Amino acid sequence: MAISAEEGLAAIRLLVCMAKADGVLKPDERYNLEDTLAGVVLPEGLTAAGLLEETSDPAELAQRIVSAEGRDYAYAGV
């Protein structure tokens, strides 16, 4: 079963939060995230660069991921 677009986007944002957890998005982390996002179709008006610049609340993002499949997807990226 596929996860919803909302859960997928929350999982991506959560992954970005984890990369920035130490307060710095290191060049290798940025490269890996940009490389991963290169194949992702994002909602209109949202770019990979924009995602990497966002400041999000990880707890709020985790609450958006409600299905077991979504949780598996989100935490497989860690």
Image (cartoon, rainbow, N blue to C red):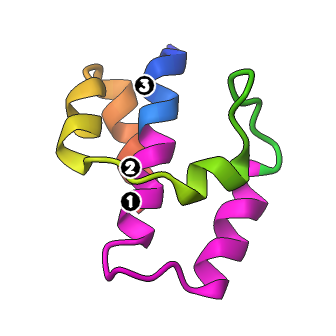
Task: Give the amino acid at mark 3.
Answer: Glu
Total labels drawn: 3
Residue 61 drawn above or below residue 66: below
- Residue to which mark 1 is pinned: 17
Q: Is residue 59 left or right of residue 43?
A: left
In terms of image quadrants, where is residue 31? bottom right
- Residue to which mark 3 is pinned: 7
The residue located at (47%, 58%) in the rendering is 16
Q: Where is residue 44 in the image (x, y as percent from the top left)?
A: 74, 21
Task: Give the amino acid at mark 2.
Answer: Leu
Q: Position of residue 18 (x, y in %)?
A: 36, 65
Crowding at dot 2, Cα within 10 Å, few <14 / some 14-19 / many 20+, comes out as many
Crowding at dot 3, Cα within 10 Å, few <14 / some 14-19 / many 20+, comes out as many
What's the distance in space between the residues labelled 1 and 3, CA to CA? Answer: 15 Å
Whether residue 3 is visible, yes or no, is no
Q: What secondary structure is found at the residue carrying circle 1?
A: helix
Task: Give the amino acid at mark 1.
Answer: Cys
| Discs 2, 1 touching: Cβ within 8 Å | yes
* Residue 73 on the magenta segment: no
Magenta highlight range? 11-37
- Residue to which mark 2 is pinned: 14
Q: Position of residue 30 (x, y in %)?
A: 64, 73
Q: In this view, does 14 lie to the left or right of 59?
A: right
The majority secondary structure of the magenta stretch comes to helix
Q: Where is residue 38 in the image (x, y as percent from the top left)?
A: 82, 50
Q: Quadrant of the C terminus?
A: bottom left
